[in-house]
Amino acid sequence: MLAACRTLGIEAKIWLGEGRFCRAIVGSIAQKSGGICTVQTDLQPISLKSDRLLDAPMPCRCGWVDLSKPDYVAYHDQEWGVPQFDDRVLFEFMLLESAQAGLSWYTILRKREGYRRAFDGFDPAKIALYDAAKVEALLGNTEIVRHRLKVLAAINNAQRFLDRKSTRLNSSHVSQ
C-alpha cells in the first residue's frame, strides 16, 4: 500500500492499487525518518512518503467496487452507505435486496430500471394490491428476475411495509 501526505498530520490519501485511493484523517504522527512518516489514521497505522503530494480529491472506494463498471462506481459513490430516510427509497432497496438473494448485487442493479417499471415505481401501496394476474405478468417480464417466490415476497413485503408504516404513524400520533 503506497500513500502520500496531502497535509502532513491532517489528511492522507492512501493508494489502494488499481487506480483506487482512499482518504484517511491522520490522528497522530508516530515517527518520522528519511521522508517516511508512520501515522495513526482513522483506518489503521500506515507509512506515508511525505515527498509525494496528491492534491486532487479522490473518493474512498471499497474493494468490492469493479471500477470497469461506471454504473457500479456511480452507485457506490452516490448511494451506497448514504443514510436514507425517504420511505419509497427504503422500500425500493428492500425490494431490490430481496430480489438479490442468491445473485450478485450488480445483476440487480443492472435490472433496477426494469424493476421500477414493473413494480409501479416501487410504490408499496400499489404493489400490496397485486393479484394473481399481476404475478403472472411479472413472471413473464424479462426486465426482472422471474422467480415466483421473489415476486410474492415483494408483494408480501409491500403489505408488511405498509403495516409497519401505519403502526409507526399511529404510535407517533398517540405519543404527541
Image: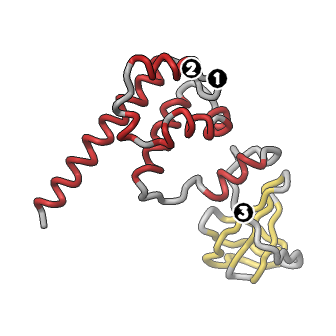
Work out how far the residue at label 2 is from the one at label 3, CA to CA, in angstroms.
Answer: 38 Å
Image disc number at residue 22: 3
Nearer the observer, disc 2 or disc 3? 2
Question: Residue at the spot x=37%, y=22% of the render?
Answer: 131
Image disc number at residue 154: none
CA neighbours of label 3 inside 10 A, class few (<14), some (14 to 19), many (20+): some
Q: In the image as oriented, which residue stretches furthest toward the front?
A: 133
Does residue 43 appear to the left or right of 83 in the view shown? right
* Residue 44 in picture, x, y percent from top left: 64, 62
* Residue 34 in picture, x, y percent from top left: 87, 77
Q: Find residue 135 and report its image quarter.
A: top left
Q: In the rendered structure, which amino acid carries the disc numbered 3?
A: Cys
* Residue 2 in picture, x, y percent from top left: 83, 62
Q: Which residue is mark 2?
A: 146
Q: In the rendered structure, which amino acid carries the disc numbered 2?
A: Arg
The answer to which of 93 and 146 lies nearer the viewer is 146
Work out how far the residue at label 1 is from the one at label 3, CA to CA, in angstroms.
Answer: 38 Å
